[in-house]
Amino acid sequence: MSRTVSFRAMKDGTREDYLLLDESERAYATGLADRVLEALRKLDHSVEGYPVSRLKHSLQAATRAARDGADEELIAAALIHDIGDELAPYNHAELAASILRPYVRPEVTWIVKQHGLFQNYYYVHHLGGDRHARERYRDHPWYAACAHFCAAWDQSSFDPEYRTEPLEFFEPLVRRIFARTPHDPRYLSSPIA
């Protein structure tokens, strides 16, 4: 039988209760890589209309990043940048950034969080939007890195003819990233506006 806490309201919890929950949450977190991989697989049957599935798009972006010599954190970012499409179609970038944030450097988190705005440059003017809205970040230290992420890996990854690595190729990388100690000082982000 599993152990449970003694409280019915968090304010009534004891140190032992919270140690139990911490132990339980840490054990659950060890399966994060599996859940991320499963969420990526679900992207194979999501938004229609594109020449490739969202999974193939994500794999293609990650493949391009890997072939360009990007580091593992950026490759992981390219792989999961659209993972939020299933549950947060209108703020998917924020969801993907939140998943990565405890495990990668602040620059990578910022790039993923802002990639939706930066991607608008390529299409939003066709829908009456401002393609230059990303310019409000022109002086941000990671502006160029995010623009590159979108130009080289994201916006160009809808090509059904591009030779793309399968998800299994990236699985060891996903497992390494999400096996890191979360909130390790090397990966803590400052606020990512």
Image (tube, rainbow, N blue to C red):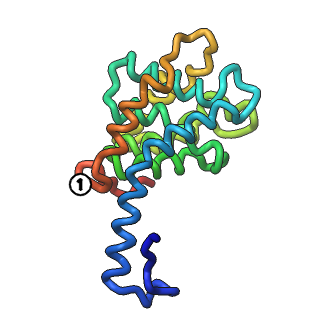
Furthest toward the front, the residue is 1
Q: Which of the 4 quarters of the picture holds residue 11?
A: bottom left
Which amino acid does the dot numbered 1 rest on? Pro
189 is higher (above) or lower (below) than 134: below
Q: Residue at x 55, y 39 (%)?
A: 38
The one nearer the camera, 125 or 3, is 3
Q: Please indicate whether residue 22 sits to the left or right of residue 63 in the image.
A: left
Mark 1, Cα crowd under 10 Å, few <14 / some 14-19 / many 20+, is few
Which quadrant of the rendered structure holds the C terminus?
Answer: bottom left
Furthest toward the left, the residue is 185
Q: Give x and y (percent) for residue 21.
A: 39, 71
114 is higher (above) or lower (below) than 162: below
According to the picture, the residue beneath numbered tag 1 turns out to be 185
The one nearer the camera, 117 or 13, is 13
Q: Secondary structure at mark 1?
A: loop
Q: Give x and y (percent) for residue 24.
A: 39, 65
Total number of numbered labels?
A: 1
Q: Give x and y (percent) for residue 22.
A: 35, 68
Q: Residue at x 63, y 30 (%)?
A: 54
178 is higher (above) or lower (below) than 16: above
Q: Which of the 4 quarters of the picture holds residue 107?
A: top left
